[in-house]
Amino acid sequence: MTQACLQLPIVEANRAGRFLADWRETRSAVALRPGACSGYLVITTPIAEGEKFDGLQASIAEQPVIVVAEQWPGDRQRFTLAHELGHLLLGGRLSAELNEEQACNRFAGAFLLPASTLRNQLGAKRHMLEIQELYLLKHEFGLSMAACLYRAKDLGIITPQTHKRLSVVFSKQGWRKQEPVNPCPQEQALLFQQLVYRALNVIKLSAAPASRAQPADFVTA
């Protein structure tokens, strides 16, 4: 893959979040092994204790680079990687009313935990979720419990009130800083190429105006 891949046309909004129906392939594609491949470079780096850094994406001498902090649990690393990939793919292609950070968060959620998969796991509508369910989702899909909870809210599986109620539990238990029981293992370095190829192949690209991108398109994937 060459630098030209970053100069793709506007993302057709109503398809931008529909990533990888087969979640097993999705999970195997999202990996962090550092190294250069096909024009992309992924680097893990140690960060001093207390530093609030997850990752970033940039271009250095026309080389697209994603940097991910190496000390975080695997679920946080994966979300960061998918989020920064979202910046590479969606940056400059969103309508003015869309917040890019929020869009990239939704991109990451849709990429790691597609809507059909989560609905199959939880059902279309729920009045409440059990903490154990979120824990099992975390270790099944490599996404934090908090991110799984937020994804359920975004997809309308639970109401905002239920999300708020459970978020209060997370805060009181100190789970926003460290989620309970076993963390997801840190990723051990696979090349980034497969992830990029899959994302680019699944996103349908067209010359449609950026104004076609709407916030809901990054929720319903």
Image (cartoon, helix red, strand yellow):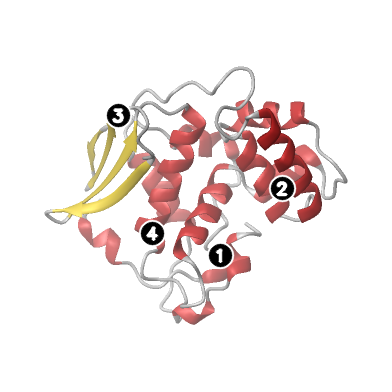
Disc 3 and disc 1 in contact, CB within 8 angstroms = no
Reading the image, the residue beneath label 4 is: 89
- In the structure shown, which secondary structural element does the residue marked by tag 3 occupy? loop
| Disc sitting over residue 48 in the figure | 3
Left or right: where 59 falls relative to 112: left
- Residue sitting at the far left: 61
Mark with earlier residue (4, 1): 1
Q: Residue at x 47, y 26 (%)?
A: 73
User: As shown in the figure, which amino acid type bears the numbered disc 3?
Assistant: Ala
Q: CA distance from mark 3 to mark 4?
A: 29 Å
Q: CA distance from mark 3 to mark 2?
A: 33 Å
Question: Residue 217 at what x, y percent from top left?
Answer: 60, 66
- In the structure shown, which secondary structural element does the residue marked by tag 1 occupy? helix
Q: Residue at x 80, y 32 (%)?
A: 130
User: As shown in the figure, which amino acid type bears the numbered disc 4?
Assistant: Leu
Mark with earlier residue (4, 2): 4
Query: Which image quadrant is residue 50 in?
Result: top left
Q: Residue at x 80, y 53 (%)?
A: 161
* Tag nearer the camera, 3 or 1: 3
Reading the image, the residue beneath label 2 is: 152
Determine crowd level at label 2: few under 14, some 14-19, many 20+ residues with C-alpha closer than 10 A: many
